[in-house]
Image (tube, rainbow, N blue to C red):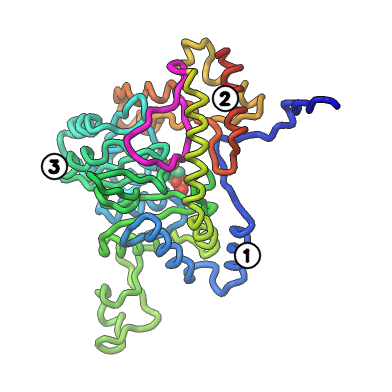
Amino acid sequence: MTAPQPKAEGTLPFLPYGRQIIEEDDIAAVSEALRGDYLTTGPLIAGFEKALCASVKAEHAVVCSNGTAALYMAAKALGIGPGATVIVPSITFLATASAPHLAGAEIVFADVDPDSGLMRPSDLEAALARAGGKADAVFNVHLNGQCGAVESIAQIARQHDLKILDDASHAIGTRYRIGGDEKCVGENALSDMTVFSFHPVKTVTMGEGGAVTTNDPQWAEALRLYRNHGMTRDAALFETQEDAFAAPGAPNPWYYELTEPGFNWRATDIQCALGLSQLAKLSRFAARRRALAAAYDSLLAPLAPVLRPVAHSDCQPTLHLYPVLIDFAALGLSRAEAMARLAAEGIGTQVHYYPVHRQRYYAARYGRTELPGADAYYARTLSLPFYAAMTISDVTRVVESLKRIFGL
Ligand SMILES: *Cc1c(COP(=O)(O)O)cnc(C)c1O
């Protein structure tokens, strides 16, 4: 008998930092949509919206082509346009800032907690002060799937008459407590609107896709308008009476009215078929992510403080990413070198995120704001492989590689 040989490193599967999990029933759902009567504007659109409402306990959901479109539609529906100011934490994907900016707003970047990457109430207050004490909205980010001090943030925002949008692209399935009550991200217990992304690295995917939830029916109507060219077929909204109606109360069947030029940001029935199939698995995916995170947490515990998970906040997260904070200087290895060595061992990592206030465009537009929390988080963060198809032995493999590479 020979002992089982360890597989050569080159033959181990590559572990990306994130990826989709697609199962046979997802494929069947998409095939069925392809065989149906509608590839777009069909019944799966409302079907997905209804399922999303049930999943996150929202009154209204408007699905669209991607999360960036969702952020833009939300900005427009909230009345954000030229002259508006929107506060955005600097540690996020740049779409959180670019979408309201493209709607016309100027962006004031907020700092974040260097240990969690989340905007703190004091960061919102400091950003408001930099905005001259007045802003129109805050686009808060539930980074990595965690919620920070959402109650205090909401309180400050309401005191200053700010609209609150949650960018929950990372946080579908996350819950938090208000007093004794458990609330879902997307339920808008404290916010006006919530945005989700269904990109393949996110917990639930549609290939590409996004959605906005709100509890206000008028905002939901506005979101539908901005999803579809800014045009309406709702006779109650028609203003061009003579062309719109054959007789009082009898709208012409071909007629639609443009309220304001817009884009086409509709999602297809094909996307929604996949989204529906995936959304039904959210609790299983979330449980899997919790188990993987718990394995990472315990295996990494001995490596602190030079290598440690980002700080946990006081919520019940469905984590999207599993980032660690690494003191690269103390360990004598640069992040670029560490990433290259990990990649050579088949382990994909990524940095989430390069602070948006340092991005060339925004730095040129607004000058260099000093946001030490964002800079410190950015300097140390590295996202490890984390997705529902991973096994606990994959987690062990990642941790063993980290120990080897950093000499821990
Ligand atoms: C993914 C993501 C977006 C954009 O979503 P897309 O669907 O890729 O357009 C926006 N904000 C955050 C925080 C994201 O992670």
Give the residue type that dot 3 points to: Gln
Disc 3: residue Cβ within 8 A of ligand 1's nearest atom:
no
Give the residue type that dot 1 points to: Ser
**Residue 333 horizontal/vertical position (percent):** 54, 13
User: Residue, x 80% and y 25% (percent of image)?
Assistant: 3
Label 2 neighbour load within 10 Å: few <14, some 14-19, many 20+: some
Residue annotated with mark 1 = 31
**Magenta residues: mostly which secondary structure?**
loop
Stretch in magenta: 304-326
Q: In the orientation shown, which residue stands out farthest toward the right?
A: 1
Disc 2: residue Cβ within 8 A of ligand 1's nearest atom:
no
- Viewer-proximal residue, 6 or 172? 6
- Viewer-proximal residue, 323 or 354? 323
For ligand 1, which image quadrant applies?
Answer: top left
Q: At numbered mark 3, what does the secondary structure look like: helix, strand or loop? A: helix
Q: At numbered mark 1, what does the secondary structure look like: helix, strand or loop? A: helix
Of badges 2 and 1, the one in the foreground is 2
Is residue 125 covered in magenta? no
Of badges 3 and 2, the one in the foreground is 2
- Quarter of the picture containing the N terminus is top right
Residue annotated with mark 2 = 399
Of callouts 2 and 1, the N-terminal one: 1
User: Residue, x 41% and y 58% (percent of image)?
Assistant: 52
Whole-angstrom CA distance, mark 3 to mark 2, is 45 Å
Q: In the orientation shown, which residue stands out farthest toward the bottom?
A: 247
The quadrant where residue 229 appears: bottom left
Whole-angstrom CA distance, mark 2 to mark 1, is 39 Å
Residue annotated with mark 3 = 159
The quadrant where residue 248 appears: bottom left
49 vs 330: above or below? below
334 vs 234: above or below? above
User: Residue, x 31% and y 36% (percent of image)?
Assistant: 148
